[in-house]
Image: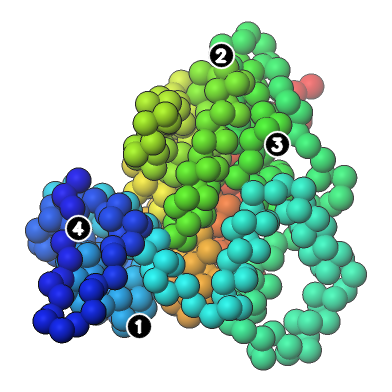
């Protein structure tokens, strides 16, 4: 890695502050690899909305390099442009030079958190979310239980009807608007440690149950387990697994992300699985990059790279061979939204569509700008609610043009965002994960049997 240059100290001025270690981790060669050709511009959601060069990938790369070179300060303006990036990595798919922009923006965000951590309130919220809530499943389940009471008791209806949300901070109002119907109390227990294969056993895989995924979208995990078992996979769900660290890495918390990565690797290595199946696109893209994340740790670099090669999205795994067993008909007009971290982060596009086309009776209608971010992007819809709403409005216009009765995708954040957009428009359109569609088709086949 090329050392990060520093600006010369003017005569008589105090010595410059030492470079922060986070900034020193920038892959300086990647900054130089960008030739500023502009082919990334049409793919960038914020550039498409704003048309401003600093809100494009090449503009942000220029800003990061200028900060790394000491030519500009990490000012309010620079911080705003970097914060407004979704980290969707659509520019990586468009880049002819192979610039790994995702690594650059994560390093830039990490430096931002070191130098400009924001107000005390913001710092407290981040510590509560990243240090207390996400890494602790029991605490996360308790919060979900409280939110379920909020929904079932009538408090949510009262709050929404009172207009209170209009006077709350934008991030809190956005959080409330994203709340889906939460699972009943009886579905909050632990998943089994092992789910046996149905029929002939063809292998043993692990399932990342996720943090928010398992607490809020338990149905996705249950459908995933049933679909995997039908394909002859014995599925291990290690009790020692926790948060994979994806949200931490995307939000500028690299040290916590590394600690969570080591814990995740340890949990699945102990389970002795041939593959680690993930049904949340953001988590999968991050776990496939564990080798990069831990490249500077001599004790873990090789182990992390080997683990990353085992990680596979559930749609990749299911599409590797023809689906086992009959699928019943589902008379649906469906459209598919590509999660950014599946299409751009993992380059998985054809597999989800192939699985949907395998369902009898399902009509798949392609969505305009299917690969453009819906505005979810981890916690982006909470930290940048105004831009997230603009991108959601853009996505909703394309969804409505399809006439679809179901929107299908493969990431929990996208499902939250798309469902909130459809609710706000009064549209009776379901938002489902790919595995939920397959699970329903298997159930329909079972009902059709005499």
Q: Classify the position of the C terminus by image quarter.
A: top right
Report, in whole angstroms, how far the alpha carbon at label 2 lies from the one at label 3.
19 Å
- Which of the two discs, 1 and 2, labels the residue nearer the N terminus? 1
Vertical comparison of 204 with 118: above or below? above
- Which of the two discs, 2 and 4, labels the residue nearer the N terminus? 4
Is the residue marked by circle 4 packed among few (<14), some (14-19), or many (20+) residues within 10 Å?
some
> On the image, numbered disc 3 is attached to which residue?
222
* Residue 214 as seen in the image, left or right of residue 187: left
Vertical comparison of 270 with 170: above or below? above
SS under mark 2: strand
Q: Residue at x 48, y 44 (%)?
A: 258
Disc 3 vs disc 1: Cβ atoms closer than 8 Å?
no
Q: Residue at x 20, y 77 (%)?
A: 72
> On the image, numbered disc 2 is attached to which residue?
203
Where's residue 306, x and y in %? 40, 25
Report, in whole angstroms, how far the alpha carbon at label 4 lies from the one at label 1.
22 Å
Is the residue marked by circle 2 packed among few (<14), some (14-19), or many (20+) residues within 10 Å?
some
Report, in whole angstroms, how far the alpha carbon at label 2 lies from the one at label 4.
47 Å
Is the residue marked by circle 1 packed among few (<14), some (14-19), or many (20+) residues within 10 Å?
few
**Which quadrant would residue 390 be assigned to in this image?**
bottom left
> On the image, numbered disc 4 is attached to which residue?
4
Disc 1 vs disc 2: Cβ atoms closer than 8 Å?
no
Residue 76: which disc?
A: 1
């Amino acid at each position: 890695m090329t050392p990060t240059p520093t600006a010369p100290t003017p005569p008589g001025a105090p010595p410059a502050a030492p470079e922060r270690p986070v900034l020193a981790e920038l892959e300086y060669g990647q900054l130089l690899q960008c030739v500023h050709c502009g082919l990334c511009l049409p793919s960038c959601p914020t550039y498409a909305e704003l048309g401003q060069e600093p809100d494009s990938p090449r503009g942000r790369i220029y800003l990061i390099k200028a900060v790394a070179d000491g030519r500009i300060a990490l000012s309010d303006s620079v911080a705003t442009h970097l914060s407004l990036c979704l980290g969707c990595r659509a520019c990586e798919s468009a880049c002819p030079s192979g610039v790994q922009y995702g690594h650059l923006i994560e390093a830039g965000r990490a430096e931002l958190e070191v130098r400009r951590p924001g107000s005390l309130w913001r710092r407290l919220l981040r510590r509560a979310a990243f240090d207390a809530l996400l890494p602790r499943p029991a605490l996360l389940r308790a919060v979900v239980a409280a939110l379920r009471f909020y929904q079932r008791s009538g408090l949510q209806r009262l709050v929404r009807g009172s207009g209170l949300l209009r006077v709350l901070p934008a991030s809190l109002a956005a959080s409330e608007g994203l709340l889906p119907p939460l699972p009943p109390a009886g579905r909050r227990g632990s998943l089994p440690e092992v789910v046996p294969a149905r029929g002939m056993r063809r292998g043993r895989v692990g399932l990342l149950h996720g943090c928010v995924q398992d607490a809020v979208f338990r149905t996705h995990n249950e459908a995933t387990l049933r679909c995997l078992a039908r394909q002859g996979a014995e599925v291990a769900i290690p009790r020692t697994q926790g948060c994979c660290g994806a949200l931490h890495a995307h939000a500028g918390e690299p040290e916590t992300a590394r600690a969570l990565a080591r814990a995740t690797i340890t949990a699945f290595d102990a389970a002795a699985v041939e593959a680690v199946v993930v049904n949340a696109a953001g988590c999968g893209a991050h776990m496939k990059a564990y080798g990069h994340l831990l490249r500077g740790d001599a004790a873990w670099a090789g182990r992390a790279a080997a683990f990353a090669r085992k990680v596979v999205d559930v749609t990749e795994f299911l599409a590797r061979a023809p689906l086992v067993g009959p699928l019943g008909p589902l008379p649906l007009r469906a459209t598919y939204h590509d999660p950014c971290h599946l299409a751009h982060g993992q380059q998985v596009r054809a597999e989800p569509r192939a699985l949907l086309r395998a369902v009898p009776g399902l009509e798949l209608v392609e969505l305009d700008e299917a690969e453009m971010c819906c505005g979810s992007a981890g916690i982006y819809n909470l930290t940048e609610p105004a831009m997230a709403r603009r991108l959601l409005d853009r996505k909703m216009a394309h969804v409505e043009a399809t006439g679809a009765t179901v929107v299908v995708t493969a990431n929990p954040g996208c499902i939250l965002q798309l469902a909130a957009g459809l609710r706000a428009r009064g549209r009776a359109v379901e938002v489902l994960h790919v595995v939920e569609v397959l699970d329903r088709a298997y159930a329909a086949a079972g009902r059709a049997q005499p």
